[in-house]
Amino acid sequence: MKKLLATILALVLALGLCSVSWAAGLTTETDGVYHIKSGEELLAFAKMVNDDSKTFEGEKVVLDNDIDISTQEWTPIGERKTGGIKFKGTFDGQNKTITLKITNCTDYGALFEAIEGATVQNVTVAGTVSGASVAGVVGQAGAGSKIINCTNKASVTGSSKAAGVVVKIEGNGVEVIGCKNEGSIGDEAPNGAAGIVTYAESANFIVKNCTNSGSISGKGASGIVYNVSDDGTGVVESCVNTGAVKSTSDSNAAAGIVAVNSKGNELTIKDCRNEGKIEGSLCSAISYNEFSNVSSAPNTNSGEIAATKSRSISESEATLDGNCALNLTVHPYAVLKISSGSYTGSIENKGSLTVNGGTFDANKNFINHNKLVINSGTFERGVRTTEDGETTINGGELETDVTTEGGKLTIAGGIFGGEVHAKDGGKVEIKGGKFTFNTTTNEVIDIQGDTSAVTISNGEFAQVSAARFCPHNENQLTVTGGIFTSEEMVTKLMGDAVNGPCATVVDGQNTMYAVGSAAIASAANSGKKVTVTKGGEITGINANVKITVADGVGDVTVNGEKVSSGEYTVPEEQKPSNNYYYYSPSTTTTDTTKGSPKTFDAGIGIYALTAVLSVTGMAWTAKKREN
């Protein structure tokens, strides 16, 4: 009998060494890990943190089974308030599901209310969550916390903020990796609703490889992160939204990835994709507000953007087609192409915008701060380029003014009915296009500011009376080419700004004035009657073409040949000018002898280089060429 009692006692002691019992049966086993197998043990775990002030720092808790505790109100783990106990250990759900119920929680209700330096991973939350600021998995994520591979399937409704995974990131270095939201998120949520994180208010946070497929609705809403606020800086990378996102407020934004950047903080949005419908007054596929540092990685959109007031473009590659009655902002690093449609709102470009078609309303602004290329389209409004902007116009119909205020404007084509303005150090280069200047003002080419300048090398300037071609600063105007309506416009109003030859051009009953060799040659080669009125060098005129040189004109050369006043016909073969390269081979009388010297002349200017080639070497000599 004594032996039996000793054996029983030994077994009891052995069992005692294998596990230590905590309230309601939560135990740590030989592996040093706390195992939760039931609802009672889950409640005991919450009590150990909330009532017994155990943080579990450096310890691990695992979930061994799916647990449903939705028949009673869940009290979130940890306490967000200052001095409150936060969970600081590792909680591994081992891909199990906790089904819970939270009703009327006033402050950051979730499975965990507050964590700090903790890891919460591999757990799915289902059921219902409601209150003021609420989420499925974590209410507040403090410094150094990691939320990894967590999924929310619960319906989350918040009267202030709502999120699928985390209400607020509120500490540096927080990581939210590989998380998913599949539940519906929102209700009123006047301060934002999001699939993954509502607010990010810390430095160096990471939200990566997260997806939202649930419907998101609130006064402001986003598929992944709603608001990067205060000192928030970080990265949102490789995230995907496929859920419908809707903003119910005219003044709050809706976006597929990030909706709001309250403080203009630095944020990188990289390799993200929106496939869901974005609906509201202020909408964007990727991010609505401007960020200081938005990655140029290929963020993309394939979802419908149903904006009623304003749309923002921050994705790297996007194309707009169709009608758009809203204000549009293209953010830095974004690349947008507009190919067709009618646009009646303001357009502000801070990224890269190419316009290949469309009609743009007269009553709204079109402002470029970065890179703008216009290849086609009808612009009833003016196009303005600011200090850092570069605008290139290759085509289209611009019915009102084009202006640069410190930036660069290049015009290579298109039809222009308004004025051209260079202000505040702005530079305008006109290399083509047709200018009708349908205006009653006196300054169709307007130069303001000591460092502003306009250069005209080509283009057609029609329907402009001499009195209306009046730059403020003629000394900052350079004209080397173009076709103008009158000689008076060029000789009197441009004066010393004109460089190169000039000529009157008669085409039937119409008389124009050509400036520059290219314009004169083009007119002459097309059969128009050309009379040179100002000297200079003219090249590119075809053989047998006739031109006239007016009396008293200075030196005129045509294809390198000096021409006096009167009519001149370009010969079939004309000796090039001394200013041209030429090749004139010659051989010695011993040419038939193998290895004998051979010479040729390579004329450069008025000098010729003579090369003597032999089997033993090469010698160069120079001699002045006799004309």
Image (cartoon, rainbow, N blue to C red):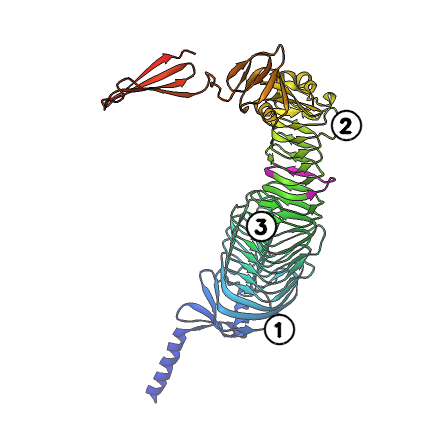
Q: Secondary structure at mark 2?
A: loop
Q: Tag 2 or tag 3, which sits nearer the N-term?
A: 3
Q: Residue at x 59, y 35 (%)?
A: 392
Residue position for label 2: 440
| Residue 245 horizontal/vertical position (percent) | 64, 58
**x and y, in percent, of residue 438 in the image:** 74, 31
Query: Going from the N terminus, do you reach mark 3 or mark 1 first?
Result: 1
Q: Name the spot of residue 81 as percent of width and height, x first.
A: 60, 56
**Residue 105 left/right relative to 239:** right
When the figure is inspected, residue 47 is found, relative to residue 535, above or below; the finding is below
- The reply, left or right, for residue 424 in relation to residue 52 is right
Residue 279 in the magenta stretch? The answer is no
Q: CA distance from mark 2 to mark 1?
A: 79 Å
Q: Mark 1 falls on what kind of element?
A: loop
Near mark 2 (Cα within 10 A), the count class, few <14, some 14-19 or many ≥20, is few
Residue closest to the far top = 552
Q: Which residue is mark 3?
A: 201
- In this rendering, does residue 395 appear at all? yes
Q: Nearer the viewer, mark 3 or mark 2?
A: 2
Please indicate, yes or no, whether residue 106 appears anywhere in the rendered image.
Answer: no
Residue toward you, 189 or 407:
407
Residues 323 and 5: in front is 323
Residue range corresponding to the magenta coloring: 359-373
Residue ID for mark 1: 72
Q: Which residue type carries mark 3?
A: Glu
User: Which residue is more in the foreground, 339 or 316?
Assistant: 339
Three-letter amino acid code of the residue under disc 1: Gln
